[in-house]
Amino acid sequence: MSNQLLVPDAHLHIGDDQLSQGSGGVYEHVYSATGEAHGSVPLAGVAEVDAAVDAADAAFKVWRAWDPADRRDALYRLAKLITANADELCRLAVLDNGVTYEFAKHGPRIAEEWTSYYAGWADKIEGQLISSNRQQRDLAYTLAEPYGVVGIIITWNGPLISLAMKVVPAIAAGNTVVVKPSELTPYAAEHFMKLVREAGIPAGVVNMVPGGIDAGEALVRNPKVQKVSFTGGPTTARKILAGCAEQLKPAVLELGGKSASLVFPDVNLDYVAAVAVYSSIVGLSGQGCAMPTRLLVQESIYDTMIEKVAAITKSITLGDPFDPNIAAGPVVNEAAQTRILAMIERAQTEGSGTLIAGGGKPGGDLAKGFYVEPTVFGDVDPQSEIGQVEVFGPVLAVQRFDSDDQGLEVANSTSYGLASYLWTNDLKRVQRFSEDLQAGGVYVNGGYPLAVGLPFGGLGVSGYGREGGKEGIYEFVRTKAVAIGSGG
Ligand code: NAD
């Protein structure tokens, strides 16, 4: 095996301990570009999850007592280490889930930005002085307090970024965490833990227990876990909420999307067609939550746009994710490949749209990997499965609309509400659509920015709660009211 394909040993990180075995068994990790097994991942069972929560609970007393400026400095050190380790983190990201190395380069950059940003918040979390109570009380104010142990459950499509988005603000605010990464992607998370230790963050502040469903459920139901922050799909989110309901535990849910991108004639169609293809079915092979996977094109430019989209899609090269000349890699695993191809087949048999490009899996050298051709359907029925349901794979549904009202109706016709995109230079239209599009974010004349200062999150079955910006750190503190009277 070439050095490029060597994987680190994965561990359970519980307090001071790094365990090579867990009671949840072992996951045989498969490299999605070749279909070959290349590492065994120890999985946490209930016992290790409970031990990790105990370790986090014990560390909370220590971490909370740290001067916020010291927490800030430790997180700045972590940010620098992420940058210094960028090459290795990119390599591990490729091995984790088959993302191309070129695309993976966004990971350390974004993770460093989020880590630095929330490092800076560590010593700026404030309560309020409440003046309206002054007549009854001499002094009334609020404290913004950490919750204690936060349970973090993430998915496999961008583990490093998810860790920076969740772990960093949680611990910046003084919480300690137990993270359950997806068993599918252990490697970048393993390296992240190494950097956490090197940054001087005390043992037990960040605990990492790769595991499956049992481990996730145990984490949610552990009574010492005070809040859950979850990234994944809506079906799992419902189960997590059921687990939280027993203890009335709060949760942040970052779920899926079926985001619409509306295109009007007054824009550069070549540019928009390229962004439409690359940001929906090329980068991460379409496995991104906020990707614009429904392209809604105004009637007068529909034929021109679909021609451009088809031509760009057919030019996309699939192959070895480490090859810088390759545009797209495989999807995460065989199960995902099978599920996506089945959705494509159903769309064809049910006549949900016209197949414009792709639609299958490549043969030859790539047949052993879990590849799916970038696929475009035109004239998609908005009520069909591919018009309504997140594929989480390289499938773009193109639809036409006539009036602004009809465009809005189609855009808002799914139960998701994560992101919406708008391509126009008409300011009145921008104002109207940014109010009327039902989504947690509306992005005009550009792709999804993942800008750390801008709160990110959904509505409807895309979830609730926000990551990013001030809202993102205040998710990890709760308000206590204090009133100090003059009697007694
Ligand atoms: P998933 O919901 O199946 O799994 C997500 C995580 O939850 C995994 O770690 C999994 O092991 C764990 N899990 C599964 N069942 C559980 C249970 N009963 N209790 C506790 N934990 C449990 O999702 P997936 O298929 O891994 O990821 C794809 C989904 O994630 C898509 O819907 C995608 O849109 C969404 N996603 C959202 C964002 C966002 O920020 N909004 C980002 C990336 C992915």
Image (spheres, rainbow, N blue to C red):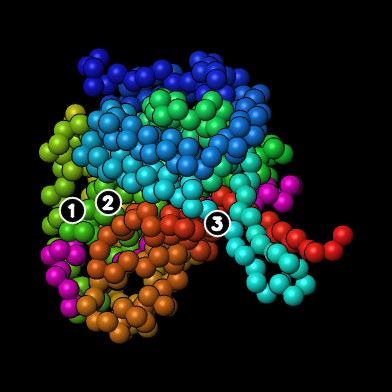
- Say which residue appears at 37% left-offset and 82% top-offset: 432
Q: Determine if the magenta segment contains residue 430.
A: no
Q: Say few, some or many: other residues with alpha carbon within 10 Å of mark 1 (under 14 / 14 to 19 / 20 or more).
A: many
- Do residues under tags 1 and 2 come within 8 Å of each other at their CB atoms? yes
The segment highlighted magenta reads 244-273
Which x, y percent locates residue 421? 32, 67
Which residue bears the numbered disc 3?
126
- As drawn, the label of residue 313 is 1
x then y, percent, for residue 483: 74, 62
Residue at point 25%, 63% (across, down): 446
Which residue corresponds to the image point at 64% horizontal and 41% vertical from the top-left? 148
SS at mark 2 in the image: helix
Disc nearer the start of the sequence (2/3): 3
Residue 151's image quarter? top right
The local secondary structure at tag 1 comes to helix
Rendered image: mark on residue 281: 2
Which residue type does callout 3 highlight? Glu
Q: Disc number at residue 277?
A: none
Distance between mark 1 and mark 2 Cα atoms: 9 Å
Compute the Cα span from label 3 to label 1: 49 Å
Q: Looking at the picture, does residue 89 appear above or below residue 436? A: above
In this rendering, position of residue 129 left or right of residue 230: right
Q: What residue sits 40% from the left and 25% below the top?
A: 198
Q: Is label 2 or label 3 in front?
A: 3
For label 3, the crowd category at 10 Å Cα-Cα, with few meaning under 14, some 14 to 19 and many 20 or more, is few
Secondary structure of the residue carrying tag 3 is loop
| Above or below 439: residue 176 | above
Of residues 252 and 403, which is closer to you in this image? 252
